[in-house]
Image (cartoon, rainbow, N blue to C red):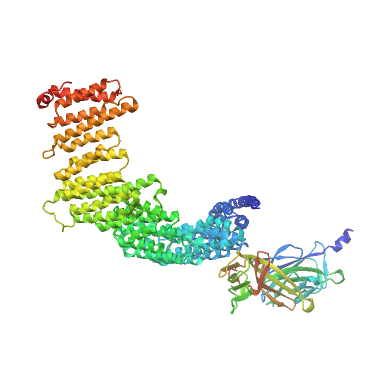
């Protein structure tokens, strides 16, 4: 049926067009013959085609445009009195004799425009008459087009300022009143269109209506084009007139469209000066009107206006734009309790953008907006709506982007409160935004309380929230997030150590709850950050060491051990062990022997109790040896205990080669190449010999289990240790011992049972070449090497 | 035969001319046979004077028992065809019985003739004024010649001319208030007014203003009433809503109207009505008829 109707419509349109063309033909013939009577007759007949009710607005427009084109010729004819011999006044009456109203009024408008042009009567009287007479057409579509025609033909004849039609009692006011009235009537017709036809095609009607909206909106455009509409007139006449109509028409489609038009066509400056009225009527619109979009648009325009030139900012202050806008928004939000959260939030975003552009210095405004947002969100479950979340992110990002300084955002009490309403993923997203901003701008956060707030903000990243198990998350994302947090921990800095300590404590407080997955990421940066402070204190102090001082290395170390202890829950013993060793070294540098000792103890305990994996043990023992070797703080007793332990562990490694390597590494513990370093040659030799024994045993074991002995690598390595310690002047290392070791290796290499390994061969060859070289070089070292034969 | 035929031919031509025939305004008049001729225009209490010329056919003489000219005001009812009722009848004897051999011209004059009624051509009735010249020839049959003229009488603007204002309606359906600026209009007048819709519950398609002429003839049981719609003027297209007011501006000049005639010599009346018609989408008509008085105003241009 719909299809049928569409086909019919095509047919009707074609018929209408044909009839218009035919009558237009006769009309033109009459015009050529200067026959007024015939011209009027055929033009009326032609215009009668516009009386159809069969066409949709779209098709009707087609028909209208054709008639419109033909009327130009008629107008030209009317203009030239010599062609028809009738005065314009009489002509004005003559066309009103037509029996049908629609052709009559089209002709009247046509003659009317000529009449105005002739200036034989005041433009305002004619305009007033035309706009009044057009009331006779109450059919929405026909009326709209008729009035649109009126608007079209009168457009260049309005008594505007500077126009030739102004003066002699014709003022801009008349022009404005005329356009306003035509606008009002058109809008009424347009609104009425929705009541046409049966209810079931309502949707179609609405579509058709929106096709026609520009006809109505055009009037506002015309108004905005009138030169004489200055701010005063806009305020006193135009705006109240338009708003009255908008509010009274009680139609959501019209209200939305017209408000939008109003906001778009008139200058920002006018809006600013009439904010109160504009916003006031916003709250009077139908509940279904999307006021938030309107307000958003308005604020966007005003924001852009504010941004366009700094000169206009005083205007904003003068009219208290923020106060007005915000109160309007509160009202809208209050009035539309059912408005989806996303709507309210997007309003706040607009307001915030506005505030940031216009009042960048008013943090309290920003906070007010956020506070309102909190009110809206309070008592509601966390946001599920994706768009709403997006808006909140936009809301929270705006101030950060504006100020490029998170510290400012941190001073807003409502900022974290908004964050609270985010679901965890959005919260994280937001936290990332914050962190990235800090990174990008290298923002330095100096106060502990701000650090506190900051970490509260990014809580979603540093803690499990909502009981969502961490392992449900994407590992890659998680790692990236945690890396960001880790980087963030390095950011706060204060020259004042006391404050810095507070910052440390604050950070610690927050990250401690991070759970086993996060701690490995977050603890190391904190530890190193603390260690950095320690180093700083150490370099400063000397004169200030005392318990009463709030920030002392001692205190810091206490803190550090607490921090590292947390890792035990992870558990991540290797990491903890490394950190303990770092701390121990730092403590050593601070001359805090007991502390260093304690840290070492912790490391050893970890090694004993937690490090089970043999590979990890190897790494760990080497680390311990390395750290211990560098420590100079320990007294003999403590050092003995520790080195003893270390060598003990070394010898107890599972694999022989590992044992061997660990043991020869222990040799360094007894020979520190330093002024006051320990130099216990005997124990060095002991270690090396022991290593040799183990290497031997390894070789034998290999031949037993695999039928061939392993490569000689271990021996070569031990040889290298010998050479090193020999060069360092260890008296227990004799050249003969080296000599015999070289020979031993050579023998082993020649033995059949030894596996040939090019790497170890090369290694050995290089070592031998080194000895050769040292010999040839001569000097002190050459002499030492002299006895050796290779 | 020729002789016989000649006997039936009028033996003379009769010409009737008016004294100021050249200057007097001529107006069209529709004859019974449908032809429109131009005839002079008079008004009441004018002098009607002129000349009657009788010209016998060459070589003939006209014997007569006297020549007279009559001024007749007649009312003719079509249903009573041929039966003229003369409400005015004035006679001037032009000649005593005698013979005419050549053209003879007589002057006549009816001074300040009372012609209270206007020439009127209606549906059922006609009112006409005529000059009738009779050459009385006794048994041979009189020679009669007629000359029509038109009478129009002008009225001064009425001293009281109230507007017509009325509220009408159908309960819970349609309530309108209309207003015509006057109750008395002259023939070239403009009807200005407006219709105000107080309540609209029906779907109106359009609204017209009609001018209707009601001609009643006869009296008592023989009264014939004929109503004609002379004008149908569309006032509104489409359905208005409550509170809408629609302007009326109707120029009367394009329509062929006459003044209102009330009880012309007890024979007929012609009255005019404005009929406001609203048509709804089911083509039902709602109307309200109001009488208006139409009068002829002295045209300043003539």
Q: Position of residue A43 (x, y in %)?
A: 60, 55
Residue B129 can be seen, yes or no: no
Q: Is residue A323 left or right of residue B211?
A: left
Q: Is residue A691 left or right of residue A543?
A: right
Q: Position of residue A207 (x, y in %)?
A: 55, 55
Above/below status of A25 relative to A734: below
Which residue occupies the foreground of this view, A175 or A565? A565
Q: Position of residue A667 (x, y in %)?
A: 19, 35
Q: Position of residue A196 (x, y in %)?
A: 60, 61
* The image quarter in which residue B80 lies: bottom right
Query: What is the tally of numbered marks visible in this picture?
Result: 0
Which residue occupies the foreground of this view, A298 or B281? A298
Q: Is residue A524 left or right of residue B153?
A: left
Residue A355 can be seen, yes or no: yes
Which residue occupies the foreground of this view, A112 or A105? A105
Which residue occupies the foreground of this view, A547 or A395? A547
Direction right: furthest residue: B1
Above/below status of A70 relative to A334: above
Task: Look at the image and tell me in which quarter the C terminus of chain A lies.
Answer: top left
């Amino acid at each position: 049926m719909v299809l049928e109707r569409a086909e019919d419509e095509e047919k009707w349109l074609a018929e209408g067009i044909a009839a218009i063309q035919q009558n237009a033909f006769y009309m033109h013939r009459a015009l050529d013959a200067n026959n007024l009577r015939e011209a009027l007759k055929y033009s009326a007949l032609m215009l009668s085609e516009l009386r159809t009710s069969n066409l949709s607005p779209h098709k009707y427009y087609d028909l209208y445009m054709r008639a419109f084109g033909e009327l130009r010729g008629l107008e030209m004819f009317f203009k030239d009195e010599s062609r028809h011999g009738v005065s314009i006044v009489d002509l004005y009456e003559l066309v009103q004799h037509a029996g049908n109203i629609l052709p009559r009024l089209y002709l009247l408008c046509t003659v009317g425009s000529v009449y105005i042009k002739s200036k034989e009567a005041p433009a305002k009287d004619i305009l007033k008459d035309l706009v009044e007479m057009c009331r006779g057409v109450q059919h929405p579509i026909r009326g709209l087009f008729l009035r649109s025609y009126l608007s079209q033909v009168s457009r260049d004849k309005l008594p505007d300022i500077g126009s030739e039609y102004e003066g002699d009692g014709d003022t801009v006011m008349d022009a404005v009143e005329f356009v306003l009235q035509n606008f009002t009537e058109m809008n009424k017709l347009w609104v009425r269109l929705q009541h046409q036809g049966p209810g079931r095609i309502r949707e179609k009607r609405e579509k058709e209506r929106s096709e026609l909206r520009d006809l109505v909106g055009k009037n506002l455009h015309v108004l905005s084009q009138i030169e004489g509409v200055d701010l005063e007139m806009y305020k006193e006449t135009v705006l109240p007139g338009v708003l009255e109509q908008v509010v009274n028409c009680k139609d959501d489609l019209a209200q939305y469209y017209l408000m939008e038009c109003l906001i778009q066509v008139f200058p920002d400056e006018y809006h600013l000066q009439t904010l109160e009225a504009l916003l006031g009527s916003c709250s009077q619109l139908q509940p279904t009107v999307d006021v938030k979009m309107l307000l958003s648009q308005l604020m966007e325009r005003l924001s852009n206006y504010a941004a366009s030139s700094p000169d206009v900012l005083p205007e904003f202050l003068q009219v208290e734009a923020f106060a007005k806008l915000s109160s309007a928004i509160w009202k809208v939000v209050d009035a539309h309790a059912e408005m989806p959260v996303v709507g309210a939030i997007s309003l706040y975003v607009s307001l915030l953008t506005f505030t940031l552009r216009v009042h960048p210095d008013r943090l309290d405004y920003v906070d007010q907006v956020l506070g309102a947002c909190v009110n809206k969100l309070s008592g509601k479950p966390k946001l599920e709506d994706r768009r709403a979340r997006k808006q909140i992110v936009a809301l929270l990002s705006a101030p950060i982007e504006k100020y490029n300084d998170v510290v400012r955002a941190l001073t807003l009490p409502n900022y974290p409160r908004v964050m609270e309403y985010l679901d965890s993923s959005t919260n994280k997203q937001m936290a990332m935004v914050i962190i990235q901003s800090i990174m990008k701008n290298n923002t330095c956060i100096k106060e502990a309380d701000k650090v506190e707030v900051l970490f509260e903000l990014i809580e979603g990243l540093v803690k499990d929230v909502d009981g969502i198990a961490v392992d449900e998350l994407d590992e890659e994302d998680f790692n990236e997030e945690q890396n960001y947090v880790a980087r963030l921990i390095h950011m706060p800095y204060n020259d004042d150590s006391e404050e810095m300590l507070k910052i440390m404590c604050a950070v610690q407080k927050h990250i401690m709850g991070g759970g086993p997955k996060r701690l490995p990421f977050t603890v190391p940066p904190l530890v190193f950050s603390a260690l950095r402070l320690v180093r700083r204190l150490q370099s400063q102090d000397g004169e200030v060491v005392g318990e009463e001082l709030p920030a002392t290395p001692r205190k810091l170390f206490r803190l550090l051990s607490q921090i590292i202890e947390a890792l035990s829950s992870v558990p991540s013993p290797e990491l903890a062990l490394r950190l303990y060793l770092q701390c121990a070294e730092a403590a050593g540098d601070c001359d805090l022997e007991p502390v260093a000792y304690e840290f070492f103890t912790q490391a050893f305990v970890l090694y004993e109790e937690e490090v089970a994996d043999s590979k990890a043990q190897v790494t760990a023992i080497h680390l311990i040896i390395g750290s211990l070797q560098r420590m100079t703080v320990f007294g003999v007793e403590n050092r003995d205990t520790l080195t003893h332990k270390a060598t003990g562990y070394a010898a107890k490694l599972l694999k022989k080669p590992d044992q061997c390597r660990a043991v020869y590494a222990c040799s360094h513990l007894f020979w520190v190449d330093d002024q006051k370093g320990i130099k216990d040659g005997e124990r060095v030799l002991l270690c090396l010999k022991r290593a040799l024994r183990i290497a031997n045993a390894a070789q034998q074991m290999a031949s037993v289990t695999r039928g061939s002995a392993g490569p000689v690598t271990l021996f070569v390595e031990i040889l290298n240790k010998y050479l090193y310690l020999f060069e360092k002047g260890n008296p227990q290392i004799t050249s003969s011992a080296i000599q015999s070791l070289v020979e031993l290796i050579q023998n082993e290499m020649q033995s059949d049972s030894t596996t040939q390994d090019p790497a170890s061969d090369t290694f050995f060859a290089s070592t031998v070449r080194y000895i050769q070289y040292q010999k040839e070089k001569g000097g002190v070292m050459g002499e030492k090497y002299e006895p050796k034969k290779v | 035969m020729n002789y016989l035929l000649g006997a039936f031919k009028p033996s003379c031509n009769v010409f009737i001319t008016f004294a100021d025939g050249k200057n007097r305004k001529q107006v069209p008049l529709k004859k019974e046979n449908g032809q429109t001729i131009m005839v002079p225009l008079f008004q009441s209490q004018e002098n009607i004077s002129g000349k009657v010329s009788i010209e016998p056919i060459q070589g003939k003489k006209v014997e007569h028992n006297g020549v007279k000219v009559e001024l007749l005001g007649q009312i003719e009812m079509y249903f009573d065809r041929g039966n003229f009722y003369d409400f005015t009848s004035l006679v001037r004897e032009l000649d005593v019985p005698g013979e005419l051999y050549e053209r003879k011209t007589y002057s006549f004059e009816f001074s300040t003739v009372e012609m209270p009624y206007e020439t009127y051509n209606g549906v059922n009735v006609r009112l006409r004024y005529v000059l009738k010249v009779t050459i009385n020839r006794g048994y041979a049959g009189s020679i009669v010649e007629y000359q029509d003229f038109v009478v129009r009488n002008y009225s001064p603007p009425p001293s009281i001319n109230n507007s017509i204002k009325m509220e009408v309606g159908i309960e819970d359906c349609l309530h309108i208030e209309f207003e015509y600026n006057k109750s008395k209009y002259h023939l070239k007048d403009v009807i200005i007014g407006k219709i105000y819709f107080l309540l609209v519950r029906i779907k109106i398609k359009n609204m017209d203003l009609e001018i209707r002429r009601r001609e009643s003839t006869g009296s008592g049981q023989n009264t014939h009433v004929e109503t004609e719609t002379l004008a149908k003027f569309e006032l509104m297209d489409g359905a208005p809503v409550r509170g809408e007011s629609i302007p009326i501006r109707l120029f009367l000049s394009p329509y062929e109207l006459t003044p209102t005639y009330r009880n012309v010599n007890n024979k007929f009346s012609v009255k005019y009505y404005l009929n406001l018609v609203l048509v709804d989408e089911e083509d039902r008509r709602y109307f309200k008829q109001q009488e208006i008085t139409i009068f002829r105003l002295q045209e300043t241009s003539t």
